[in-house]
Amino acid sequence: MDYVISILLVCLSALFSGLTLGLMSLDTYDLKRKIDIGDKKAAKIYSVRKKGNLLLCTLLFGNVAVNAALSIYLGSLTSGFIAGAIATGLILVFGEILPQAIFSRYAIEFGSKTVWLVKIFRFVLYPVVAPLALILDRLLGEEIPTIYTKRELMKIIEEHEDSTDSHVDEDEEKIVLGALSFSDKFVYEVMTPRTVVTAIEKDELLSDEAIEKLKRSGKSRIPVYDDKIDNVIGILFLRNLLGTDYKNKPVEQFVEKNILFINEEKKLDEVFNLFITSKQHLFIVVDEFGGMEGVISIEDILEEIIGTEIVDEFDQHADMRAVAEKRARDRKIIE
């Protein structure tokens, strides 16, 4: 009988110790998110975890009471020194280290199965622990949620994709990371530089040869300028020429003049919103003095989000910035 009582007290000590670490380590906001996606185990735990200070006081008070009872009981069976040594060893190994190691890894599993016991202990100890919990509530206020920085969220996504147990695949990782990072980038980082922009003068006469040349550029939206490329006056949509009599007519007759100019220092998220509100697909990029620096399309921004190149109707090259850089290097070699 003595052994049974001792084992029972050690088990209770282990339960209180493990639950203290396991349940208190669970963030209430994480539990709410799990509940929102239908996690029944999280719902069970949240019923006691939502009142954190009351739960903490209940578990700590119960743990201290059981450990004290174990020491006193063992002291009644043997000498004081031996009883103290045995009680300390049992409490340290089986009442603290082992249960905390287990509950720290399986808090949801074990916590959901022992919630009914926690509710019983809370009911029994309520007259004692409730005033203490109320004081803590007044002093400390509500629990502070864990808020992750953007870089932390990106690291979490990367770690999830690398895990064998993750439901996040490589494509989903690319899209999420792109969505989180694209607002930190500027227009000049993703635009097509003016050195590789295919443009056409407004007075040039259209012909089959001219259209074929424009198609070979790989773009379906062509900036139209007056005299020099810094004076862009509109956009020529090649698809609008289909079924029309364009031969020997000046480009200006087919130009869409509702265009927007944006500064190269603008953030991509601002430009993306501008694309949506303006219902346009191509902006002319200018520097602080109004000089034409390049063009940016909505596809350029979407590419940053999804992490892969989007090919235009007539694209010959996926990455026009790479083409521009190669041309610049080639010019330096020639010089």
Image: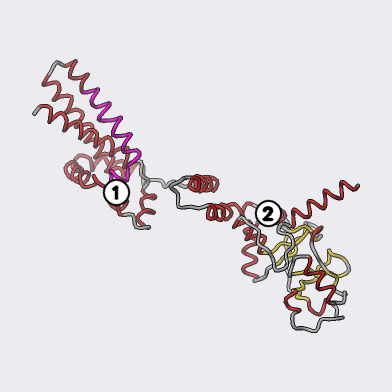
Disc nearer the start of the sequence (1/2): 1
Q: Which residue is mark 1?
A: 45
- Position of the N terminus, as image quadrant, is top left
Taking the image as shown, residue 33 lies to the left or right of residue 153, namely left
Estimate the x, y position of residue 216 in percent, counting from the top left: 79, 67
Give the dominant element type of the magenta stretch: helix, strand or loop: helix
Percent of width and height locating residue 96: 28, 30
- Out of 165 and 116, give the one closest to the viewer: 165
Residue at image mark 2: 186
Asked if the residue under mark 2 is in contact with the one under mark 1, i.e. CB atoms within 8 Å, the reply is: no
User: Which of 239 and 99 lies nearest the eye of the viewer?
Assistant: 239
User: Residue at the location (83% across, 69% down)?
Assistant: 200
Amino acid type, label 1: Ile
The residue located at (29%, 31%) in the rendering is 98
Give the label on residue 65, or none. Answer: none
Secondary structure under badge 2? loop
The residue segment tinted magenta is 87-112
Instruction: Pick out the residue farthest to the left.
Output: 1
Inspect the image, locate mark 2, and give the three-letter code of the amino acid beneath it: Phe
> Is residue 111 magenta-colored?
yes
